Amino acid sequence: MFGGPDEMPAADRPAPPDRAADRVRVLLPLPLPGAYDYRLPPDVPAGPGDYVEVPLGPRRVVGVVWAEGGGGIEDGRLRPILRRFDVPPMPEVQRRFVDWVAAYTMAPAGAVLKMALGSAAGLEPPRPVTAYRLSDAPRPPGFKATPARRRVLEILSDGPPRGAAELALEAGCGIGVVRGLADAGVLEPVAMRVSEARRDPDWALPGPVLSGPQRDAAQALRAKVRAGDYGVTLLDGVTGSGKTEVYFEAVAQALEAGRQVLVLLPEIALSAQWLTRFEARFGAPPDLWHSDLTPHQRRTTWRAVATGQARLVVGARSALFLPFPDLGLIVVDEEHEGAFKQEDGVIYHARDMAVVRAHLGRVPIVLVSATPSLETVANCEAGRYERLDLPSRHGNAVLPEIRLIDMRADRPERGRWLAPSLRDALARTLEGGEQAMLFLNRRGYAPLTLCRACGFRLQCPNCTAWLVEHRLAGQLRCHHCDHCVKLPDSCPSCGTGGSLAACGPGVERVAEEAAFLFPEARIAMMTSDTLFGPHAVEELVRKVTGHEIDLLIGTQMMAKGHHFPLLTLVGVVDADLGLQGGDLRATERTFQLLSQVAGRAGRGDRPGTVFLQTYMPEHPVMQALLDTDRDAFLASEARERIAAGMPPYGRLAALIVSGEDMEAVDAVARRLGRTAPRMDAVQVLGPAPAPFALLRGRHRRRLLLKAPRGVQVQSLVARWLDQVPVPGSVRVQVDVDPYSFL
Ligand SMILES: [Zn+2]
Ligand SMILES: [Zn+2]
């Protein structure tokens, strides 16, 4: 398991060959084994780190000059570099980072470089952007000033022109509102250069008043940023303790020193409130980096980072690969989140790789969580990471009271999912004019549809998975591939009409029950199926904050970050759900998720209560939640993992063999099983069919290598793979430090 950057020896890079002045090695963003030699024409001066365009077969490809050229290819066959882009070279630290990540994750360096290039279009000088200001023209007849429109106009009434996306973000409305105002002639477009359109965050603005413990932690972090050297600090505090305000002080310090800052968040789209807080603190929005950016936004942000204009970037995990020339601080918020692990392409953990990036760049990094991962806690205990505690909630807020509902005794009626005691509590909360939340981490209406006549279960043809009914959309969907069908009228197996029955609850079904129980309540759902894009989330969050919603029902999308002062009751419909997977981190993840959900209750002046519906009230997770004794829980988790030699006290690497031809997949998997490393203390489990033995039409087999901490698993796995020929129809993926076992 990842134990800090010192654990990994330097990448096995070949010694630099003899210098040849007119040739360079260029790394291409393609899954190729290494960099290629190209000739450097006299009129194209390019050195290490420069972005260049080179021929590759019949194509032209953008690459990065990785090193001086070696021999190997005779001069006559060498093809020339076509052009060099006018943008600062990729910093040396970034290139070492690409090599490091490639070596650690056993991915081709070119595949990692692809993430670092982010947007090749950013290499070209930016075109002017369109910003908007208020028009002097009179309002057109029939103009309707909706609340959203009014917010846009208000923002522009005393401020500089802004781009449509930024205006929409600030006003908390869709971009269509801004466009509509422009079409109506109320706003007037102005062309601005990108650099003019930027507003830098202002570190000198006064921050909020901090409590004693917050101030101490903030000062400690500021000192680390001033010292400007590598060090990992865990900022550990319960939900609502004001961790964000504390690390904002470290951010301010880094900005004051004129350096760049990277804040990683698990799912950027969900953090509209974070952005509002950032802007309130620093007077300008941060630069964003996530998968929902428009090509234009990607281009400008990438370039602004590369040129050093972007002072602060907040982004999802791929932001880590942006070419910061002067990074002075990294913050990883919600460091325990599984979403930091990328599971396809280059399989890496962004939190762990962020620590490596900080180490290579000699800068401090702050990991932030209310429920830190066992990995991070173990690194603190081993003295590799430091720890700062924020012991209590900020202001008047106290931690919510946790109650377990034993579903074996306090049973819901048949076909219902809410226990009588939870129903009563909901009724009291809503009558008292407070808000409530029901949490069920399961999308759709019902997780399983089965035939009452013959017992047939509706399954995805491409995956080992049931089809999930989405009643609002009138569909059955597979949550693992794109397969979706209309709910059939009769059983596909026995042909009986009207025999299909929904089994178990999804979040839509809970919403149906709540609407039946509380017809007067204003109910809203918060799931990825009902909200599209950050603006929809933002709009809903605004409604909840403004008490236009009484009861919020949703999935884990709801669990994070949001701060609803009037919300005093949280009901968890199925607290046992996450424990069913049974993998290494099932209990840890369940504890983290439920703590996070529970943390939504009672964040204002009124105390909160959390009800957990469980069939296993005696389970250690439920008992730990009941006692809010996180450290005892972590200690017992640690004891079990030590006894089993499991991460973070041992190392794992998974091989996933997949392909459409089951026999070919099995042949490779068996051969890997036979050639598995045989060493003391190293154990190889499998091959075995993966829990998803069929996924998106591909058959899957897994092998798992387990080794003590000191073993460098990468070289072991590399030697192992070298012995097994793999036909083109079969893929073998390596997952170092796996988090998913599916
Ligand atoms: Zn049937
Ligand atoms: Zn499927």
Image (cartoon, rainbow, N blue to C red):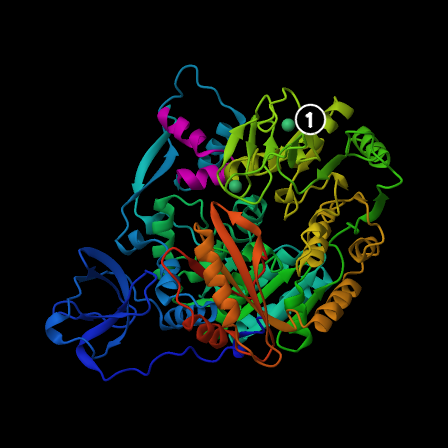
Q: Name, please, the residue furthest toward the left.
A: 76
Q: Residues within 10 Å of mark 1 (few under 14, many from 20)?
A: some
Magenta stretch prevailing secondary structure: helix
Residue 56 in percent (x, y) is at 21, 60
Residue 129 falls inside the magenta stretch: no
Please name whichever residue, 477 or 697, is drawn nearer the observer in this view of the structure: 697
Q: Which region is colored magenta?
A: 163-183
Which residue is rendered at x = 42% and y = 58% of the image? 731
Quadrant of the image for the N terminus? bottom right
Up-down relation of residue 71 to residue 597 (above or below):
below
Residue 268 in percent (x, y) is at 52, 49
Residue picked out by circle 1: 453
- Answer left or right for 419 relative to 478: right
Is there any visible trace of residue 505 in the rendered image?
yes
Which residue is rendered at x = 44% and y = 34% of the image? 175
- Answer left or right for 123 relative to 426: left
Please name whichever residue, 361 or 484, is drawn nearer the observer in this view of the structure: 484
Helix, strand or loop at label 1? It is loop
Give the amino acid at mark 1: Ala
Disc 1 CB within 8 Å of nearest ligand 1 atom = yes
Which residue is rendered at x = 51% and y = 36% of the image? 532
Asked which quadrant contains residue 737, the reply is: bottom right
Q: Name, please, the residue furthest toward the top.
A: 142
Residue 643 in percent (x, y) is at 73, 72
Residue 336 in percent (x, y) is at 62, 59
- Answer left or right for 322 relative to 430: left
- Answer left or right for 234 relative to 314: right
Is there any visible trace of residue 363 in the rendered image?
no
Asked which quadrant contains residue 690, the reply is: bottom right
Quadrant of the image for the C terminus? bottom right
Which residue is rendered at x = 78% and y = 56% of the image? 621
